Amino acid sequence: MPRYLIETYGCQMNYSDTERMETYLENLGYSKTDSTKEADLIIFNTCSVRQKAEDRVLGRMKEMRSLKKNNPNLIITITGCMVRESSSRYSEKRDKLLNRVREIDICLRIEDLPQFAELIRELNPDDYTKIEEESLKDYFRIPATYSQTTKTQAFLPISTGCDKFCTYCIVPYSRGREHSRLITEIFKEAKELTEKGYKEITLIGQTVNSYGLSVYDKINKKFEDLPENKEPFVYLLEELDKLKEEGLERLRFTSPHPKDMSDDLINAIANLKTLMPYLHLPVQAGDDNTLKRMNRPYTVAQYKEIIKKLRTAVPDIAISTDIIVGFCGETEEEFENTYSLFEEIKFDHAYLAQYSNRIGTFASKKLPDDIPPKIKRERWHKLNSLLKKTSKCILKNYVGKTVKVLIETKTDDVCIGRCEHYKSVQFSSKKHKPGDIVPVKIIDSKEWILIGELVIQAQP
Ligand code: SF4
């Protein structure tokens, strides 16, 4: 039986794709291995958000060359953000990576996963079974193995691709245009997960709250039968909220786009029983001119207004964000505006990146990457120091409060899990296990984690 190994880089979308790829390959007759020496197929599920992520994958090619010397039939595949064209090294129209890196045999756009068997056959015409199973011919219908998360919480993709075309981002080119999965299919998968005992589901999509609003979805009239004026994403959340009766405790989603943060969605966050009081809302910059160059279609004032509405509807909501510093043409004043936004909003957490040029994007063609690396680093450190200070203060405020923790892992008697606001919490318990949700009183806060004590509940 041939063996496969997948190395996954990047965001939750990639980890979720890996879970679907595993099912597909197992149906193709492959079994999983953790050893590169045993593998007949090695897949790099790549991320292009930063140059470093690409460099890490390309840096593995020397090792792949020596593995191929010992196993000439070894197939190296690249999928994820680095790929533009699904092709093998024998295809007529080939991805540029296949010309550039001779160790690579197949490039696979993830939404073309159902065509993977054909690409493998282009290399080994006599090998491996053909996919007959209907559900494996549609990317969204391929069941996931859920191997990339703990058995308490799962990622559930509801859409793929992106129509937003931020000037620095490669996703609309690598993943293609946005399209959404049917509500019935998502509900079915969420119900099955709940029946299996999963307590928390995170809905994922590149811009998860534009679910059902893309050009593709509209042309294909996928959401025409929804109640009048109902936003597809809000309707989906309301439907999934009904699974509370069957044991689904927590619903989250990531990442929403500020442009599609409607009042109805804010109301849903405030009122649905399963939705947790935490939102990751990428802002990317705190200056209108920078946002314009990034092609982010909102102003700083509009972003602040969304935060105000969120905090009015859910006063204790935790909010995190993404920021890029040193974007093309970012002046000192523009950066200071981003810094001020940070001071004002007081984010619970933020993923800070120094801008790096991604080939193929609008920015790489039209906007000079003109901020010296030293300045980018300085701006990053300045923002990071502020973030550390704010986050420390916010965590300190939890001391003395009781939160509900969904236990994700347990080693000896030490349990680690997340509370409603997505903070990591550590405490001790002899009798509880992963999957339990228990009250924990916070007694201390470290840099990124809360320390607590189990609240002993009175026996009924
Ligand atoms: S919204 Fe912008 S950053 Fe996010 S995936 Fe789409 S193009 Fe990329």
Image (spheres, rainbow, N blue to C red):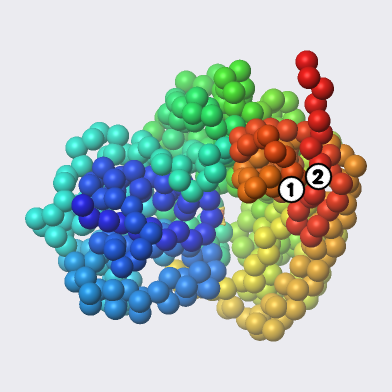
Screen quadrant of the C terminus: top right
Instruction: Report x, y in % for residue 376.
Output: 69, 77
At numbered mark 1, what does the secondary structure look like: helix, strand or loop? strand
| Viewer-nearest residue: 441 or 62 | 441
- Give the amino acid type for the residue marked by disc 2 in the picture: Gly
Q: Residue at x 29, y 78 (%)?
A: 66
From this viewpoint, is residue 95 visible?
Answer: no
Q: Tell which residue pokes out farthest to the top in this image.
A: 460
Instruction: Report x, y in % for residue 235.
Output: 58, 26
Above or below, comparing residue 422 to residue 221 in the picture:
below
Q: Which residue is drawn at 77% across and 33% down?
A: 439
- Give the amino acid type for the residue marked by disc 1 in the picture: Gln
Q: Is residue 290 left or right of residue 113?
A: right
Can you tell which quarter of the image residue 85 is in? Answer: bottom left
Q: Residues within 10 Å of mark 1 (few under 14, many from 20)?
A: many
At numbered mark 2, what does the secondary structure look like: helix, strand or loop? strand
Q: Which residue is drawn at 69% across and 25% down?
A: 273
Instruction: Report x, y in % for residue 393.
Output: 88, 55
Q: Which residue is drawn at 78% across and 40% down?
A: 317
Q: Is residue 425 left or right of residue 395?
A: left
Which residue in the protein does label 2 denote? 452
Instruction: Report x, y in % for residue 431.
Output: 68, 34
Q: Residues within 10 Å of mark 2 (few under 14, many from 20)?
A: many
Residue 426 numbered tag? 1
Above or below, comparing residue 439 to residue 379 in the picture:
above
Q: How many labels does the image show?
A: 2
Using the numbered discs, state the Cα–Cα distance from disc 2 to disc 1 in whole angstroms.
6 Å
> Ligand 1 sits in which quadrant?
bottom right
From this viewpoint, is residue 249 visible?
Answer: yes
Above or below, comparing residue 47 to residue 369 in the picture:
above
Disc 2, disc 1: CB below 8 Å?
A: yes
